[in-house]
Image: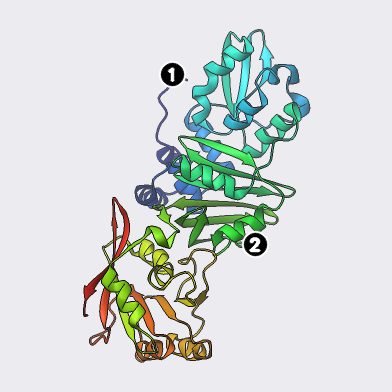
Amino acid sequence: MSKRPIRLGEMLVQMGRVTADEVERALAHQHAHGGYMGDALVALGILTRDELWWGLANQHDIPFVHLRPENIDHELAARVPAAWAAEHRVLPVLWDEGRVTVVMPEVGGLERLEEVRLMTGAREVVPALTSPEAIADLIEAVHGPAERVGVAALLAEALERGATAFGVSARPGRAVGWFRAGDVVARALAPDWRDELGRLVQPPVPAPGTEGRWAATARVGSEICPLECHLVGSGEAMEWAAVPGPRLTADPARVHADPALVQRARDARRAGGVAARVACDPGDERAAEALLTLLPARLLGDAVRAIHLADRPGAAPPGTLALSLAQPLAATAAGLEPFVPDCVTVGVDALGEGDLDALRRLAPFVAVLARSAVGPAPDFDCVVRLRLGADGPAWTLAGTD
């Protein structure tokens, strides 16, 4: 334990498990999203979770073990309270003349060893790594089934504690939700976790057996949180992880709006009234697209009939009528004219020829966030700018375009 471990990426390259280019990709991901090198390697699909634990064990010169419940000292393990063991996922399992072996799923649990020593009366504590599934089975065998929590409660706790990542580890018949806030905290999830996750996160987590990476949005309580999601799966097993972005209010009333903008939107009574270009500071595009869906209610009241159109999923929070563009924007807008909405918000890479005219025919107030240049001669009536400040988000009327 006194040996100073080499860097995880360097060790994996030396062992031939990853390449130097893959390590560079993981470093770039870690720099952009925070967290640990191992998390980045798993998020990018370079390593599986099992391979990461094995690598961490080798890096820190700690054994990696698989123990069955019948092979541990239950009386010893029971000296650690059930709630503490479930919270920290640390469990003493073997006693050898005052020397106790403790299993944990991450190296971060090493700081708990002294607490285990005091609870067990051990002379020496020796750590070993195991998988989260194995530690969950061992704790359940000793203390009985863990209390199961809902996904919403877990995500709310994760955001409250400033988690840098959270996710779900699912295996046939069992799912564990987790988040990293310093240590990794894990909770057994209620049986309806997939349905609940589908209501909270849009677009939802794909079915097991698929892999991918996508942008999504979670709505937890009164907040919206942009997410960068990652998924690996095999058969009925899967690992889903999400890196959260800045938390945003989901309450339109808590978003400030320029009175002149409110008045201009309410003065628009018929199709073609106001078409606004949406602008924001660099780096705030995802926040702008999420908050854009709240703009109609902020300007026109809760009874507004609004539709959000987007060329990529995941921008709008759950509960919003958000339509993904399966055909050109102008054709989609024309097909929606029978519904005569009060307002239409749009998030696209760029407007094509005829798009803005089609949107003008659709609703009295149109707000468009185009991620790249709109065109040489945009025909917007005004610019609406989002600013994220210490006092919260604010929409301002920046004038004519």
Can see residue 350?
no
Name the amino acid type tagged 1: Ser
| Circle 1 residue | 2
**What residue type is disc 2 on?**
Ala
Q: Earlier in the sequence, mark 2 or mark 1?
A: 1
Residue 65: where, in percent of width, then height? 64, 30
Whole-percent x and y of residue 207?
65, 62
Q: Which of 289 and 168 lies nearest the eye of the viewer?
A: 289
Query: Is the residue 40 above or below the residue 378 in the image?
Result: above
Q: Residue at x 59, y 31 (%)?
A: 87
Query: Which image quadrant is residue 51 in?
Result: top right
The image quarter in which residue 63 lies: top right
**Closer to the camera in the image, 364 or 240:** 364
Q: Position of residue 40 (x, y in %)?
A: 45, 48
Q: Residues within 10 Å of mark 1 (few under 14, many from 20)?
A: few
Q: Circle 2 is placed at which residue position? A: 207
* Label 1: element kind: loop
